[in-house]
Amino acid sequence: KRWSWTELQSQISDTSVVLSMDNSRSLDLDGIIAEVKAQYEEMAKCSRAEAEAWYQTKFETLQAQAGKHGDDLRNTRNEISEMNRAIQRLQAEIDNIKNQRAKLEAAIARMK
């Protein structure tokens, strides 16, 4: 049987179409946010560990340098003390020699 265009239209117009969609592919935003947050926290933890390691190394280096400078300062102070004692000894020798000279000059003057 052949259908006429008007018959087909009348049958189709009385038909209702029901569409159902499967939304099981919806985005799990909470899961995605939690995953990104976990990745960020891991990166922050690594960065923090790297920074702490760098600062610890820097601190130890500065501590060693401070110790060395402290030793250098002590050594320099000891050298200065030794030089001051040497100056005092030399000054005492100079004073003794001046006294000897004065005595010799006085003796020479008496002989004349």
Image (cartoon, rainbow, N blue to C red):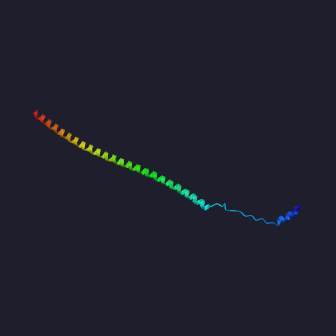
The residue at the point 52 percent across, 55 percent down is 44
Residue 79 point in image, percent of width and height: 29, 44
Report the front residue among 16 and 93. Answer: 16
The residue at the point 46 percent across, 53 percent down is 52
Report the front residue among 95 and 11. Answer: 11
Residue 16 point in image, percent of width and height: 79, 66
The N terminus lies in which quarter of the figure? bottom right
Residue 82 point in image, percent of width and height: 26, 44
Report the front residue among 98 and 68. Answer: 68
In the rendered image of this protein, does residue 6 appear above or below residue 90?
A: below
In the rendered image of this protein, does residue 103 appear above or below residue 77?
A: above
**Which residue reaches farthest left?**
111
The residue at the point 34 percent across, 48 percent down is 70
Which of the 4 quarters of the picture holds residue 95?
Answer: top left
Report the front residue among 79 and 7. Answer: 7
The residue at the point 50 percent across, 56 percent down is 45
**Which residue reaches farthest front?**
1
Say whether residue 51 is left or right of residue 35. Answer: left
In the rendered image of this protein, does residue 64 appear above or below residue 30?
A: above
